Image (tube, rainbow, N blue to C red):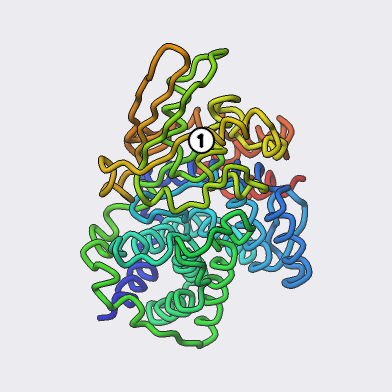
Amino acid sequence: MHALTKLAEFVANHPEGALTPETRAAIELLLLDLMGATAAGLHSQLATAARQAAIEAYGPGKAQVWLTGTQLSVTGAAMANSAAASALDIDDGHRGAAGHAGAGVIPAALAVGQAINAADNDILDAIALGYDVALRIASSRPTSTIESYSSGRWVSYGAAAACGRLLKLDAEKMAHALAIAGSEGPIIFPSGTSKFQGSTVKEGIPPAVVAGITGAYRAKAGATGPIDLLDNEQRYDPTILFAQLGQVWELQKCYLKPYACCRYMHAAIDAILKLRRDGKPIRKLRIETFPQALRLANERKPKTLEGGQYSFYFSCALAALRGAHALQPVDPANLEDPEILALASRIELEASPDFATVFPVQTPARVVINQGDGDEELIIHHPLGDVANPMSWDQVVQKFRNIARVSLDEAAKDQIISAIHRLEQTGFSKLFQALAKS
């Protein structure tokens, strides 16, 4: 049996409404976290351009563009929402996958679910199954074979699984939906071959959503795809791809991000925040991390928010001088702050042999800082938000309130928080109502 066929049978035939209370609670947490990321990124260049393109290219329909009052076609709304959710790099991620599933799967599931008026349990099932397919495929890639850590390489599978589940595709058509999505998803530059990580292409998640949704609808209409895509066991390890399938949900292994920058640098930021003493001058700041982190663009003077998100120098200088709040989200004015840029120019960054083999299971950092009283050192193995150091519901609520302030007033925040916290009682209709308000 083809690997894609086995995954498709799982997605198509999983019992309806059988998710555990723990899995449902995890989905609620991921939903709130993603809505915060969306509100924070709503007015970014990436998101505004995507919305305008969605209006012009995809046209009106029954699916919401969240927080705008606009309704577009399924693909247009999902693409626009995905762009806003992923714009500031503060969306959920997964260690094994080394990337972000939520900004693709949730917009796809909610757009299709709203457009076809799907039952609440069906939307929840679609989210869980979409995450599982995407994250299992991404995690099953042996590190030595990974050409790109851009999430767009595999998010299309998750969007197709979520969409196909809601469209109630049978196993055969589901396999073709996954095959079309996987073969036609965005290529995205291989890591290390492009230093233009400050562009709004970023990880290619929005076009992956388009590929996934259209792949499912095309399979429904009878289109076929290359269902042997995952059959090379040297590139997709079946022991990881199918491990405890249906028993362990990968979305419960996702991390959440307290800071609007690449996850690679969160351990360093946590260490800096713990060591930092207000008013003390920073005479030296050295960061030791894992080798893959040095493959980021790491501009000392980034020109865009996207560039800042992929720069240890800028993000760590910002944290050291302005605190955690400055990364929730980042004010573009900080890109021209002379004090921040001066510190960024002096930060030392190097790969440590101690962390040579830990990625992607861990993204640790050692920070050495001198604030006038000699060197102080701290190692962080599990930054805030990791499964081993999780954020609570209350912490995610506080993050939501902080990062959504650029787009939402307190009443609108309260409505979204309440709708998600009471999802089991009131269903998705209340959430859609809350998200319809601009």
In the rendering, at what x and y percent does residue 307 appear? 60, 49
Q: Position of residue 358 (x, y in %)?
A: 28, 46
| Residue 1 at x, y percent in the picture | 25, 81
**Residue at the extreme left:** 239
Which of 423/328 is in front?
Answer: 328
Return the residue nearer the eye: 110 or 425: 110
Residue 381 quadrant: top left
- In this view, 263 is above or below 63: above
Left or right side of 1 for 198: right
Q: What residue sits right under mark 1 in the picture?
A: 258
Q: Residue at x 33, y 73 (%)?
A: 9
Camera-side residue of 342 and 80:
342
- The amino acid at mark 1 is Pro
Closest to the observer: 235 or 40? 235
Occupied quadrant, residue 264: top left
Q: What's the residue at 74%, 66% (across, down)?
A: 53
Q: Is residue 384 above or below residue 232?
A: above
Residue located 31% across and 41% down the image: 352
